[in-house]
Image (cartoon, rainbow, N blue to C red):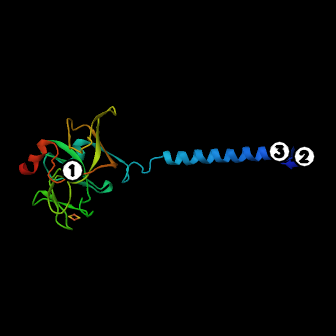
């Protein structure tokens, strides 16, 4: 006769005890795996913090008037730009050379990096200096009052036409699009922007 074991007031033989222990450990394993899966399914960054999504408000309040100096949004580390052709873009405020923070220069009407002198147009297009490419940009969504997406940044990072100033502006700082290599331009109309300003 197999040895009897008393567990939690219940008498059982060795086989029953081993089966019970195995079931309990499997239960713990399933619960732990479920917890880990749930944690990984959560977004890594919360809305409103760098790396996450920024819901900024309507375009009229968010962007400067067409062709005027860009507006910095420090919390998201991006510039909000509206070209004279009414194209909008959110440009990452980190130089594509060695990662310095660059500034907008009203005198020369361009971004200038204080570290090694790279320069970029209003829409982030490379002008000169050691930077290997134009400025990186974040994916932007334009959303109507019903929450429907009207337009979104394309895979090349071209500035978006802004059809309506009442559209809501959402910027995804977790979705960075690398700037185009030197010599490559964005939407054709943008190539004239810096000359017009
Ligand atoms: S880091 Fe900007 S030019 Fe070198």
Q: Position of residue 96 (x, y in %)?
A: 24, 58
SS class of the residue under badge 2? loop
Depth-wise, is mark 1 or mark 3 nearer the camera?
Answer: 3
SS class of the residue under badge 3? helix
SS class of the residue under badge 1? loop
Residue receiving disc 2: 2
Q: Residues within 10 Å of mark 3 (few under 14, many from 20)?
A: few
Give the residue furthest to the right: 1
Mark 2 and mark 3 in contact (Cβ < 8 Å)? yes
Depth-wise, is mark 1 or mark 2 nearer the camera?
Answer: 2
N-terminal of the pair, mark 3 or mark 2, is: 2
Asked whether mark 2 lies closer than 8 Å to ligand 1, one says no
Q: Residues within 10 Å of mark 1 (few under 14, many from 20)?
A: many
Q: Position of residue 44 (x, y in %)?
A: 44, 50
Marks 1 and 3 sit apart, C-alpha to C-alpha, by 68 Å
N-terminal of the pair, mark 1 or mark 3, is: 3
Residue receiving disc 3: 15
Residue receiving disc 1: 180
Residue shown at 73% from the left, 46% from the top: 22
């Amino acid at each position: 006769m197999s040895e009897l074991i008393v567990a939690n007031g219940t008498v059982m033989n060795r086989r029953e005890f081993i089966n019970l222990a195995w079931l309990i450990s499997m239960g713990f394993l399933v619960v732990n795996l479920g917890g880990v899966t749930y944690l990984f399914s959560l977004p890594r960054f919360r809305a409103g913090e760098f790396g996450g999504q920024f819901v900024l408000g309507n375009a009229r309040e968010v962007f400067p008037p067409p062709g005027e100096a860009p507006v910095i949004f420090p919390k998201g580390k991006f510039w909000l730009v509206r070209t004279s052709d009414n194209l909008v873009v959110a440009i990452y405020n980190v130089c594509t050379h060695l990662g310095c923070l660059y500034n907008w220069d009203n005198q020369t009407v361009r971004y200038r990096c204080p570290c090694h002198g790279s320069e970029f147009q209003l829409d982030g297009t490379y002008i000169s200096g050691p930077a290997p490419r134009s400025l990186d940009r974040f994916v932007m969504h334009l959303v109507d009052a019903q929450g429907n997406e009207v337009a979104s940044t394309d895979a090349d990072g071209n500035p978006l036409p802004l059809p309506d100033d009442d559209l809501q502006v959402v910027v995804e700082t977790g979705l960075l699009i690398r700037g185009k290599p030197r010599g490559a331009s964005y939407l054709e109309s943008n190539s004239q922007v810096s000359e017009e300003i």
